[in-house]
Image (tube, rainbow, N blue to C red):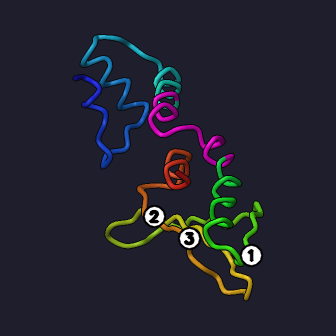
Amino acid sequence: MILDTFVDLATVYTPKDIVKGMLKLHDVSLTYMQAWRAKEKALKILCGDPAESYAKLPGYLYILEQTYPGYVLSLKRKEVVDGVALRGVYGGTMLTASTMDPRGHVLPLAYAIVNSENDASWTWFFK
């Protein structure tokens, strides 16, 4: 299948790559913006909508409360994410998310090393 050409989790496909691929495989010319919109639509179909994922958090919190009675759980929207450029041979960007427990200790929730800090990397990280 042709779509398999573009489904490689190790590769970040840019709109420029999509333009070249569509021209080569299908002899169809696309503008950069057409490729950008097609990529955004495909990512939404494949990975889901970030807003919908965020909307599921209260339900997840409810399940946690039912699973761990007696624990105090709350959901507050705060900026708890950061990205930092990595130096050295490999480069890239480290994305992190953390929270604070009731005693004031910082707890890491997730981290990832990505090629660059951009919308696609952050969207993938949050999913």
The percent position of residue 32, horizontal first and vertical second, equals 48, 24
The percent coordinates of residue 6 (x first, y second) are 30, 33
Does the stretch in magenta take in 46? yes
Q: Look at the picture and state if 52 lies above or below 122.
A: above
Question: How many C-alpha atoms fall within 10 Å of the one at disc 3: few (<14), some, or many (≥20)?
Answer: few
**Amino acid under label 3?**
Leu
Question: Which residues make up the magenta segment?
Answer: 41-55
The local secondary structure at tag 3 comes to strand
Kindly identify which numbered label has been placed on residue 112.
2
Q: Is residue 11 or residue 53 the one in the foreground?
A: 53
Q: Determine which of the numbered discs, if any, sits on residue 72 in the image.
A: 1
Whole-number angstrom distance, CA of label 1 to CA of label 3: 18 Å
Instruction: Classify mark 2: helix, strand or loop.
Output: strand
CA gap between label 1 and label 2 equals 28 Å
- Is label 1 in contact with label 2 (beta carbons under 8 Å)? no
Coordinates of residue 85 in the picture (x, y in percent): 50, 66
On screen, residue 29 above or below 122: above
Residue named by callout 3: 109
Q: Residue furthest left?
A: 1
How many labels were placed on the picture? Answer: 3
Looking at the rendered structure, the kind of residue marked 1 is: Val
Residue mark closest to the camera, 1 vs 2: 1
Residue 3, picture quadrant: top left
* Mark 3 or 2, closer to the camera: 3
Closest to the observer, 110 or 68: 68
Q: 104 or 9: which is nearer to us?
A: 104
Q: Residue at x 29, y 41 (%)?
A: 8
